[in-house]
């Protein structure tokens, strides 16, 4: 597991980056963009989860969110390559 967060995470009081890093999860900050609004999760190299859903209580209980689960090894592979390229290029 790896996490790519936007630069706003550097300035908030309790940040996701610290929580993830302290949990042993490699965590990266996208400093190129004001907001890294992409929400993509690849699970077991075969399932892609994407959408506006933030995995927060507010998203679950109050907000109008969407979440799409796509079971496709081909699509997961494409996202894995894209994420790796973005990490290397610092362009996520």
Image: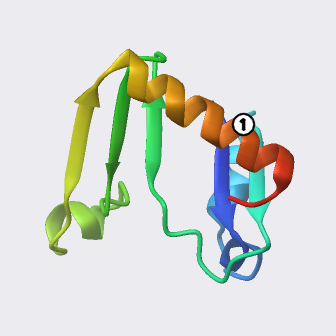
Q: Quadrant of the C terminus?
A: bottom right
Q: Residue at x 39, y 16 (%)?
A: 73
Q: Position of residue 55 (x, y in %)?
A: 35, 54
Is disc 1 surrounded by few (<14), some (14 to 19) or many (20+) residues within 10 Å?
Answer: few
Q: Which is more toward the observer, 1 or 37?
A: 37
When the figure is inspected, residue 92 is found, relative to residue 7, above or below; the finding is above
Residue 30 in view here: yes
Residue 21 in view here: no
Q: Secondary structure at mark 1?
A: helix
Q: Residue at x 31, y 63 (%)?
A: 52
Q: Position of residue 27 (x, y in %)?
A: 75, 47
Q: Is residue 74 left or right of residue 30?
A: left
Count numbered badges in the picture: 1
Q: Is residue 15 left or right of residue 27?
A: left
Q: Residue at x 29, y 62 (%)?
A: 57
Quarter where residue 2 is shown:
top right
When the figure is inspected, residue 91 is found, relative to residue 36, above or below; the finding is above
Q: Quadrant of the N terminus?
A: top right
Q: Residue at x 32, y 21 (%)?
A: 72
Quarter where residue 82 is shown:
top right
Residue under circle 1? 84
State the scheme by which the image is colored: rainbow
When the figure is inspected, residue 70 is found, relative to residue 13, above or below; the finding is above
Q: Is residue 36 left or right of residue 41?
A: right
Q: Position of residue 38 (x, y in %)?
A: 48, 61
Q: Position of residue 26 (x, y in %)?
A: 76, 38
When the figure is inspected, residue 75 is found, relative to residue 22, above or below; the finding is above
């Amino acid at each position: 597991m790896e996490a790519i967060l936007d630069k706003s995470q550097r300035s908030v009081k309790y940040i996701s980056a610290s929580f993830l890093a302290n949990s042993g999860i490699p965590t990266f900050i996208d400093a190129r963009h004001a907001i890294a609004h992409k929400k993509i999760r690849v699970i077991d190299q075969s399932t892609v989860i994407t959408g506006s859903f933030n995995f927060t209580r507010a998203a679950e209980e109050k907000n109008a969110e969407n979440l799409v689960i796509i079971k496709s090894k081909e699509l997961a592979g494409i996202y894995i390559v894209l994420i790796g390229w973005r990490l290397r290029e610092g362009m996520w």
